[in-house]
Amino acid sequence: MKQYYKYGIIVSIVCIFIIGIFLLWNKTPKIKLNGDKQIQVLLNQSYEELGATVETFPFHKKYPIKIQGYVDTTKVGDYKIIYQISFHNKKIQKERIVKVREEEKPIIILDGDLKIELCPNHPYVEQGYHANDNYDGDLTDKVVIHKLYDRWIYTVEDSSHNPFVIAREFVYQDTEAPVITLQGPSIFTVYQNESFQEPGYQAMDACDGDLTQDVQIIGTVNTQTIGNYELKYTVTDHFGHTAEETRVVRVIPKPIENGKTIYLTFDDGPSRTITPGILQILREENVKATFFIINHSDSLNYLIQQAYEDGHTIAIHSYTHNYKQIYASEDAFFDDLRQMANKLESITGEKPTITRFPGGSSNTVSRFNPGIMTRLAKALITKGYTYFDWNVGSGDAGGVHSAAEVYHNVTNSLNSHTNVVLMHDYENNYYTLNALRDIIHYGKNNGYTFSNITETTPQIKHRIAN
Ligand code: ZN
């Protein structure tokens, strides 16, 4: 009985040993990767296969590892490498992910400003953006926008997960005043005892839109009394910004209808060579004209004196006639004008009120200062002056080659109402001097009256172009 018990133990031990051997023999070998499970390789750099090893047991043979998969380092991407062995007709495998990446960040370029002002209660309208990457190219579609407090945050990632972030700040505020646009002229002329009709206006505001209904007009026009009336148009937007525009309404005496009239005007004089001859012809022909004078040597003052005594109109053209200087600002213009007015008053004893802008009110030489002519024309009237342009050109300031040409230019352009003829009496302008008597004769023979410009002369004004 004791023997059997002993054998039983031996058999059991042998059995356990055999089972142990069997289990070990059947134990699955392990593949162990050399290096990490995930590795990163820079674009266009070489990938070195690190391989793997197999953990085996004493009873196992050596297992060859089959490596499958490839890594294209010229293309960003995730590449899978498979390591495989066969064990009792079973496949055992392990994977490694090789990430090919580049390091340069993409960029987002915002259209519009980095800081923008938004009208309160107006929806934000995206100003636009585009994103680009050295590797992926256009990434605009991949941009993600979200709002963070007072900023829009634009984010994008390239295929290598390099991020780029940019912010656009916005503030809700209205900083702009409305704009009032006057319809009709800003200097409006109405004849005495005729009615004044408001030509209209419009007010627009960037945030509030059309504010025309809210415009208030301060001031009145009494067409029974001659004078200048200022109408002030004001409007205030919801945020307290006020706009103001003014219109000057001139109530002038109704001109006496004198039919076909020629107003000869001479600019840029007086001159030693031309003005005496012009004055002599005008005297002999008993014709009154208008001289728009600029500053010359005081030795020529006697010609101004003489013209005045002959009954011609002494008018202001400019002291310097220097466009860059006089159209630089309103102050510069009126400094120049006042200087000429003072000089003329000191010669004649009479304050001149008739003026002509150098280059005419329609000049474009002043465009270096946008809107200056519009402002000057209005301010001139407010200060009590009147300006005249012309509607008949003689071409004598350039382009003509004979007195006959001056004569034809003038006589061919005459109309049967008011004719303000532009001529010049600056030094050596002999074509004009030599054409003058023929022009006067033509006028007289064709039923024209000659007159000098006064406050009641029908307005001849160009359309202001600046
Ligand atoms: Zn001139």
Image: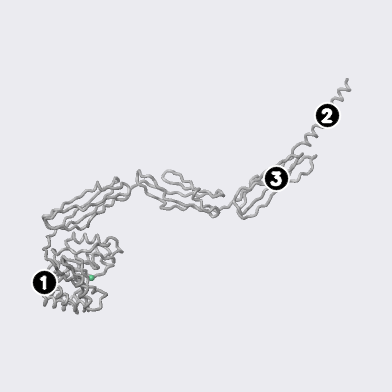
Would you call the spot at circle 3 few (<14 residues within 10 Å), some (14-19), or many (20 or more)? Answer: many
Mark 3, residue position: 83
55 and 69: which one is in front? 69
Which image quadrant: the N terminus? top right
Q: Which residue is drawn at 79% across and 33% down?
A: 20
First-in-chain label (3 vs 2): 2
The reply to whether the C-beta atoms of the residues labelled 3 and 1 are less than 8 Å apart is: no
Direction from residue 24 to residue 441 in the image, left or right: left
Task: Tell me where residue 313 appears, x and y as whole percent.
Answer: 14, 69
Mark 1, residue position: 311
134 and 104: which one is in front? 134
443 and 186: which one is in front? 443
Q: What residue type is labelled 2?
A: Ile
Would you call the spot at circle 2 few (<14 residues within 10 Å), some (14-19), or many (20 or more)? Answer: few
Question: Can residue 158 be spotted in the picture?
Answer: yes
Say which quarter of the image contains residue 465.
bottom left
* Residue depth check, mark 2 versus mark 1: number of the one nearer the observer: 1
Which image quadrant: the C terminus? bottom left
Would you call the spot at circle 1 few (<14 residues within 10 Å), some (14-19), or many (20 or more)? Answer: some
- The secondary structure type at the circle numbered 1 is loop
Direction from residue 341 to residue 86 in the image, left or right: right
Question: Can residue 295 be spotted in the picture?
Answer: no
- The secondary structure type at the circle numbered 3 is strand
Task: Tell me where residue 295 appears, x and y as whole percent.
Answer: 20, 72
Task: Tell me where residue 404 appears, x and y as whole percent.
Answer: 21, 78
Mark 2, residue position: 13
Q: Quadrant of ligand 1?
A: bottom left
Q: Which amino acid does label 1 sit on?
A: Gly
- The secondary structure type at the circle numbered 2 is helix
The reply to whether the C-beta atoms of the residues labelled 3 and 2 are less than 8 Å apart is: no
First-in-chain label (2 vs 1): 2
